[in-house]
Image (spheres, rainbow, N blue to C red):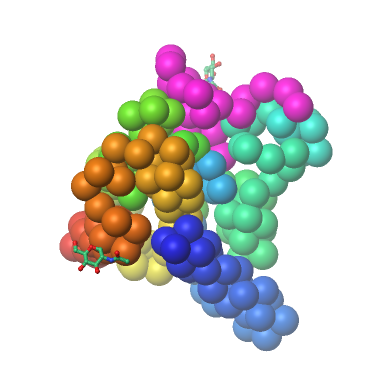
Amino acid sequence: MSYYITLSILMYFCINVVVGATNNIPKFSSILVFGDSTVDTGNNNDLIISVAKANHEPYGRDFPSHVPSGRFSNGKLVPDFIASYLNLKDTVPPYKDPNLSNDELLTGVNFASGGSGFDDYSSVFSHSIPVSNQIEYFKDYVGTIKEIVGEDKAKQILGDALVIISAGSNDVIINFYNLLTRKLEYNISGYQDFLHNNLQTYIQVGKIL
Ligand SMILES: *[C@@H]1O[C@H](CO)[C@@H](O)[C@H](O)[C@H]1NC(C)=O
Ligand SMILES: *[C@@H]1O[C@H](CO)[C@@H](O)[C@H](O)[C@H]1NC(C)=O
């Protein structure tokens, strides 16, 4: 299932980073995150309508300063831990935070949105930001980085970024098996192919920027 495949992409980075920590920590310039609630650090906080919000108790009770930051967790999430291991920063801020400093922007941000997936239709129910729209925000982000440091340095920073993508569970568990609409269109293997094709398209867009 795509759920396991995307989680294993995440695990691959974790293992690499943890192994790297005991030898040579790879030199990543920044961290960029896309996906769903497994990695969202607060992009849904300001959405007017969303069933996928976590900026309220009991979330965040073990987070630094015990703030319910919008993470679907009692504490930090995997991207935060990875950013710490890489000595980039302690937490990865949501891109939708209106007060991001240049330093935060340059060391990496998070585009993930709880309730979303590789299928835009998965966000209709949760009113979240689908991965396809996260890529649109990423395009804006690239423009901002170029404004801050110039074209060449921006290419270097983006080229050396660690990218984490974690999604697929909302597509398969909620969209395909619960809402049933996609089931009229695809069987599970056809739906998996559809998700993988979308993911490939998103990665291609990211590569050409
Ligand atoms: C952003 O900064 C302004 C001015 O410092 C402040 O009024 C506002 O509350 C901040 N917003 C967030 C979401 O932190
Ligand atoms: C899924 O549908 C395709 C045709 O769209 C078919 O070739 C394939 O055998 C089906 N797979 C399963 C597991 O039913």
Boundaries of the magenta span: 41-58
Which residue is the extreme one toward the top?
48
| Residue at position x 44%, y 38% in the image | 178
Q: Is residue 104 magenta?
A: no
Task: Give the quadrant of residue 78.
Answer: bottom right
Q: Judge whether 68 appears above or below 120 on screen.
A: above
Where residue 23 appears, x then y in whole percent? 68, 85
Q: Is residue 23 left or right of residue 2?
A: right
- Left or right of 36? Residue 68 is right
Magenta residues, dominant SS class? loop
- Residue 44 position within the rendered picture, expressed as x and y whole percent measured from the top left: 48, 28
Q: Residue at x 63, y 38 (%)?
A: 72
Which residue is at 66% across, 80% downward? 19
Give residue 191's quadrant in the image. Answer: bottom left
Tell me if residue 103 comes above or below residue 47 in the rendering: below
Q: Is 61 drawn above or below residue 14 in the view shown?
A: above
Q: Residue at x 62, y 75 (%)?
A: 15
Q: Quadrant of residue 182?
A: top left
Q: Is residue 167 left or right of residue 129?
A: right
Q: In this view of the protein, can residue 56 be seen by the observer? A: yes
> Where, quadrant-wise, is the N terminus in this rendering?
bottom left
Query: How many numbered marks have been drawn onto this rendered protein structure?
Result: 0
Question: Ligand 2 is in which quadrant of the figure?
Answer: bottom left
Q: Nearer the viewer, residue 17 or 116?
A: 116
